[in-house]
Image (tube, coloured by chain):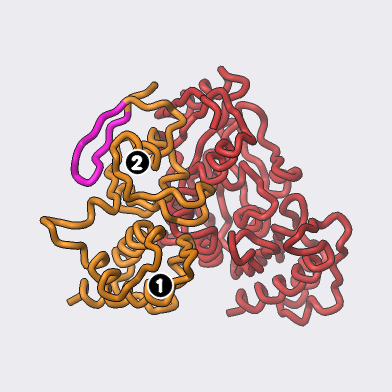
Chain colours: A orange, B red
């Protein structure tokens, strides 16, 4: 066992883990943060995307030990004071989801995109979502939601 | 995933010691291939030595007429780096086309070339740009580094420290990527340098290689027409459900022409 310490959604946590514990297992099973989903579990679908030190990463392809000392933000950490994050609000408003399974990863990934590029074109959004798969194929509204969130966040 | 001991040394010496101390130890760079492989139980290292705590392995600097990239520099960092973008834009573009944004935020140059996946992008850059791989023991020329399928010249206990890419006069990378994984079905890096032209190819064969016939033709005339009439043999090339060896041979010619057109600007 090893002890990992990290800040998750603003709260400091320290837990003992088996070295082979994936970050997504740690979040879901030890911290009960089940908003981060396990989709393919093979690094392809992006349902498990979280922010680690501000950058989007696949929590199924990272050990909890590798996040030791890092700041992690999951979908549960986006809303502030009971108000949805503008990206969450845009997904709701523009129905950027069908079954909703891919949504946490889509939203976190989109938040990272806007950090780097506050005014992305439709093409840039679609390129960025390369690592996020929606098996309902609901991409049109997802892209629309991100475009509106970008607009809201710039104004 | 099978159980293992986890180490996160903070110096190169400590990492090399940990590697030498355990016969079945493996290095962990960005983990974007290593961890999926372990999850499928295709690898069962006794010890995993995480290199992320060693500061000297990360970053980009200029060194004379070359750009030196630390082994643990991520693809996203290479793609965004101002030195790389201004000196070797082809390398920045290659890094920006690997996998997807999340993979690029963790995957590293050192991990990619040490793994030597036949479809990885970076081997084309190392071979095509005539880079030198610096390890904790020696320097290895690009032409000697990739030995075979997932096989490099690295010896047990040896780890990649950095890669030195000479700045070319002009270069470009063109790849025909697999639409799902973005791995290269075929990727070609063409570079024109003071010493001639280099053509590095990935995806087509068990390991990255140079296409010398194309290099000679382009040295005389750095134009896509110079490649007309060069036929690439399918002998020894990879064939799988995605592309036959014959199709890959054809793609080598097409991608090489596209790279030359892009390099001419």
The chain letter under disc 1 is: A
Q: Earlier in the sequence, mark 2 or mark 1?
A: 2
The correct choice, above or below, for B159 with respect to B71 in the image is above
- Residue A151 x, y percent position in the rendering: 24, 77
Q: Nearer the viewer, residue A65 or A45?
A: A45
Q: Taken as a whole, is the magenta stretch helix, strand or loop? A: strand
- Residue A50 x, y percent position in the rendering: 35, 51
Residue A7, magenta (yes or no): yes
Tell me, yes or no, whether dots 2 and 1 are on the same chain.
yes
Q: Nearer the viewer, residue B241 or A33?
A: A33
The picture quadrant where one finds residue A21 is: top left
Residue drawn at (40%, 38%), measured in percent from left and top?
A: A25
Can residue B118 be seen? yes
Total residue callouts: 2
Residue placed under numbered mark 1 in the picture: A125
Residue placed under numbered mark 2 in the picture: A28
Q: Which residues are magenta?
A: A4-15
Front of the two marks 2 and 1? 2
Say which mark, if any, is on residue B114: none
Apparent side of residue B215 relative to residue B122 in the rendered image (left or right): right
The picture quadrant where one finds residue A96 is: bottom left
- Residue B153 x, y percent position in the rendering: 70, 38
Residue drawn at (69%, 40%), measured in percent from left and top?
A: B152
The correct choice, above or below, for A11 with respect to B7 in the image is below
């Amino acid at each position: 066992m090893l002890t990992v310490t990290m800040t998750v959604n603003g709260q400091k946590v320290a837990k003992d883990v088996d070295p082979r514990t994936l970050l997504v297992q740690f979040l879901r099973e030890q911290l009960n943060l089940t908003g981060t989903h396990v989709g393919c579990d093979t690094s392809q679908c992006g349902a498990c995307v979280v922010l680690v030190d501000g950058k989007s990463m696949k929590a199924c392809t990272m050990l909890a030990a590798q996040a030791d000392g890092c700041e992690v933000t999951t979908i549960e950490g986006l809303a502030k004071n009971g108000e949805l994050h503008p990206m969450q609000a845009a997904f709701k408003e523009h129905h950027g989801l069908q079954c909703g399974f891919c949504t946490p990863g889509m939203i976190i990934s989109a938040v990272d995109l806007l950090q780097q590029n506050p005014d992305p074109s439709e093409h840039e959004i679609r390129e960025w979502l390369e690592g996020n798969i929606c098996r309902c194929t609901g991409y049109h509204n997802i892209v629309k939601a991100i475009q509106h969130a970008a607009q809201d966040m710039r104004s | 995933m099978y159980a293992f001991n986890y180490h996160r040394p903070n110096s190169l010496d400590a990492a090399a010691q940990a590697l030498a101390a355990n016969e079945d130890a493996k290095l962990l760079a960005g983990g974007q291939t290593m961890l999926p492989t372990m999850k499928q139980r295709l690898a069962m290292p006794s010890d995993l030595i995480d290199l992320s705590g060693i500061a000297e392995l990360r970053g980009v600097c200029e060194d004379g007429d070359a750009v030196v990239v630390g082994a643990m520099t991520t693809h996203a960092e290479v793609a965004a780096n101002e030195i790389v973008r201004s000196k070797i834009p082809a390398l920045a573009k290659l890094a920006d086309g690997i996998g997807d944004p999340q993979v690029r935020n963790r995957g590293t140059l050192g991990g990619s070339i040490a793994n030597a996946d036949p479809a990885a992008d970076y081997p084309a850059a190392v071979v095509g740009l005539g880079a030198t791989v610096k390890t904790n023991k020696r320097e290895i020329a690009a032409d000697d580094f990739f030995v075979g399928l997932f096989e490099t010249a690295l010896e047990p206990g040896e780890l990649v420290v950095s890669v030195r890419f000479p700045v070319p006069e002009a270069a470009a990378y063109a790849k025909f990527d697999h639409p799902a994984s973005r791995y290269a079905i075929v990727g070609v890096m063409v570079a024109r340098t003071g010493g001639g032209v280099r053509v590095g190819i990935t995806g087509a064969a068990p390991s990255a290689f140079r296409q010398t016939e194309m290099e000679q033709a382009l040295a005389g005339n750095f134009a896509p027409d110079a490649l007309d009439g060069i036929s690439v043999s399918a002998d020894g090339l990879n064939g799988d459900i995605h592309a036959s060896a014959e199709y890959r041979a054809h793609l080598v010619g097409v991608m090489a022409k596209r790279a030359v057109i892009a390099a001419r600007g």
